[in-house]
Image (spheres, rainbow, N blue to C red):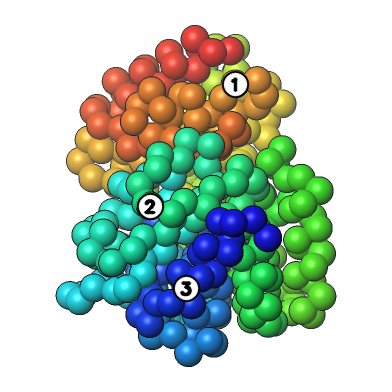
Amino acid sequence: MTDLYAQIIKMIGKAKDIAVYCHTNPDGDTLGSALALYASMKKIGKNVSIYCDCPVPSKYNCLYLSEDIAFPSKGSHDLAISVDCAGIDRLGQCMKSYLSAKEQIAIDHHKTFARFADTCLVEICAACSQIVYKLLKQMKIIDRNIASLLFSGIVTDSGCFAYSSVTQETHKIACELLSYEFDAAKVIYDVFTGSELAKFKLKTRVLSKTRFFEDNRVAVILFTKEDFEETETDISCTEGIIAELIAINDVQVAYSLAEASTRSYKLSIRTKSPVDASDIAMTMGGGGHNRAAGCRINGFAEDVIEKIVKAAKDRI
Ligand SMILES: [Mn+2]
């Protein structure tokens, strides 16, 4: 056990009141990591809360204890732990609550991690849930429910073990988790493969309008407010659709632009080697990984598209 793991276990042991924080627009990894920590803290008798600054997408309602996720009200905690947040802005409106705790820990796996806590446990790997697994394994606290949460996080962030971020350690951890005998095929269907009909309608509508640039090496999809209204979906339903673009042989850089508010878009970026997605995101104030990254971008849709296509063109 490295000193950092020992130190965090000590900090957890000492704290009576602990808060665990997911990132805004939560995905399976931040939820799996945070809920696994939350369930573990509960198990050892801590007074523990779990927070997110926006509602959890309905596809994750299947996750153990997800109904306990709340928005922080007044009152501060002994110890605040953020998971899967590369920067403090990822906490969104939970930032104040996080900073008001007596001590902060950040657990993350992004290469663009910007240090924002006194204690940072950061390893570059396929999912933050891998790091949380190693921590909870040391604490000898993992059970069937906790294992299924960590597995959910790994499955979603690794594209079900398909991405280049997946290593021997990813598979080794998944293998150890499977020994807890939860229904792994059901978890994969629930958090990865399965889709609601409304999302299917959104997906087919938007993909049919995919735009290609630079000899089909750059692909862009745009989700507008009307797309969400007409299909009775919201921005959380855009997750994963970009995978269809980067799966096209010719495409080197894929973009998904989703209208979050007037002239403000959530940009997701996927790339093939050697184009670095986090490099593109960082020039626009965001961050992420080599193959997957994102940021917020403002402007008229056509201007934004011109800007991001240029950023891709400069790198392919
Ligand atoms: Mn993650």
Looking at the image, residue 263 lies above or below residue 237: above
**Residue corresponding to mark 1:** 275
Of the two numbered discs 2 and 1 in the rendering, the one whose residue sits closer to the viewer? 2
- Which residue occupies 81% across, 48% down? 168
Looking at the image, residue 303 lies above or below residue 244: above
**Residue corresponding to mark 3:** 12
Looking at the rendered structure, the kind of residue marked 3 is Ile
Disc 1: CA contacts within 10 A as few (<14), some (14-19) or many (>=20): some
Label 2–label 1 contact, CB within 8 A: no
Left or right: residue 143 compared with residue 12: right
Looking at the rendered structure, the kind of residue marked 2 is Asp
**Residue corresponding to mark 2:** 118
Residue 16 shows in the view: yes
Secondary structure, mark 3, is helix
Secondary structure, mark 1, is loop
Classify residue 144 by image quadrant: bottom right
Left or right: residue 137 compared with residue 245: right
Disc 3: CA contacts within 10 A as few (<14), some (14-19) or many (>=20): some
Left or right: residue 159 compared with residue 114: right
Looking at the rendered structure, the kind of residue marked 1 is Val
Label 2–label 3 contact, CB within 8 A: no
- Which residue occupies 41% across, 64% down? 81
Task: Give the quarter of the figure containing the C terminus.
Answer: top right
Classify residue 185 by image quadrant: bottom right
Q: Position of residue 155 (x, y in %)?
A: 67, 58
Label 3–label 1 contact, CB within 8 A: no
Measure the alpha-carbon separation of dots 3 and 1: 40 Å
Which residue occupies the foreground of this view, 261 or 314? 314
Q: Position of residue 276 (x, y in %)?
A: 56, 25
